[in-house]
Amino acid sequence: MGDASLEHSHGHHMDPAVEYSSSKLGMWLFLGTEILLFGGLFAAYAIFRAKYPEMFFEQHVELNKKMGAVNTCILIFSSLTMAMGVSAIQRGKQKATAILILITILCGLGFGVVKYFEYSAKFHHHIYPDTSIFFSLYFLMTGLHMLHVFIGLAILGVLFVLTLKGKFTAKYNTPVEVGGLYWHLVDLIWIYLFPLLYLIG
Amino acid sequence: MSTHSHTEERHITGNKTYIIVWAALMVMTVVTVYVSYINFGMLNIVIALVVASVKASIVALYFMHLKFEDSITWVFALFPLSLLALLIGMTITDTFTRTIVP
């Protein structure tokens, strides 16, 4: 590694330890921007809730607490299987990792199905994003979150296929760990969305 | 914030720890849902946000492995939170101290 010319001839080959830590730091940095993206919406929520507390209270009752709670449980469980998947690949257990990632994907899809029924029920009751500031925020915040679930599912799908192909080992598993971080962020944001929208309006 | 974990010998969290963390998250979810049916007035939002923050913290510490990361990762993880506090804090302060409407 000390020989500069040798390193140069290898071009894109990085020291694996450096590659690992910079990938992880890069993901944490990206997650920071994600938090601030949602942060703008949380700030909007804070202002309008403080200005119109009665309206928020009256309208949040329209949301289905049970469905919100079911989705919270689904996401928390998916975070558990994702975390276990990362530990499994770090121990070199490829089959267990693939199964755990698959369960995580199924949970994510389940979350989407519940959300689909929730949105349908709202539209059926003629509740749309332009119904009120509360529902404008509800659709925007949960919609943006749903977009993140879909992106997370796409990442997990790629990780699942690559795990099956045996690309990840106990020695090299950075994408699984970094992809897992993204999936946990999706859970993290829902942890705030659920009480703020469904429980206290 | 432990420094004993190097990339060569990474800390691997056991499934037992993960299941305990998951159970704690589930208990806290049940608590917030239960509390939401009781009217504590302004206290409801405080309880909801405190419980959510405890949940978020243990997700970050254990599921996201932050507990075993080095200090630079902690800086990367915590710095955006101070920006978030600034964003929400300043906006709220402005909204409620403004005497002249736009």
Image (spheres, rainbow, N blue to C red):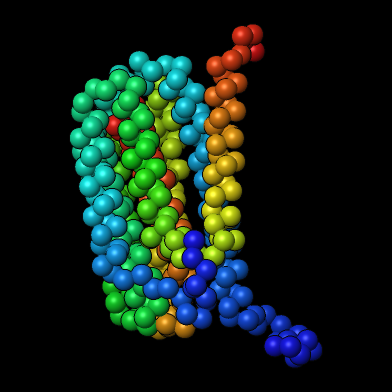
Residue A43 position (above or below residue A97) = above
Q: Position of residue B8 (x, y in %)?
A: 51, 81
Q: Is residue A198 left or right of residue A31?
A: left
**Would residue A74 be visible to someone looking at this image?**
no
Residue A177 position (above or below residue A59) = below
Q: Position of residue B32 (x, y in %)?
A: 26, 37
Residue at image position (37%, 53%) is B58
Q: Is residue A68 left or right of residue A128?
A: left
Q: Is residue A82 left or right of residue A155?
A: left
Looking at this view, name the residue that lies furthest to the right. Answer: A5
Say which quarter of the image contains residue A18.
Answer: bottom right
Q: A127 and A92: which one is in front?
A: A92
Residue B95 position (above or below residue A28) = above
Say which quarter of the image contains residue A201.
Answer: top left
Q: Position of residue A177 (x, y in %)?
A: 45, 68
Q: B87 and A119: which one is in front?
A: B87
**Would residue A79 be visible to someone looking at this image?**
yes
Residue B63 position (above or below residue A121) = below
Residue at image position (46%, 60%) is B66
Q: Quadrant of the C terminus of chain B?
A: top right
Q: A75 and B47: which one is in front?
A: B47
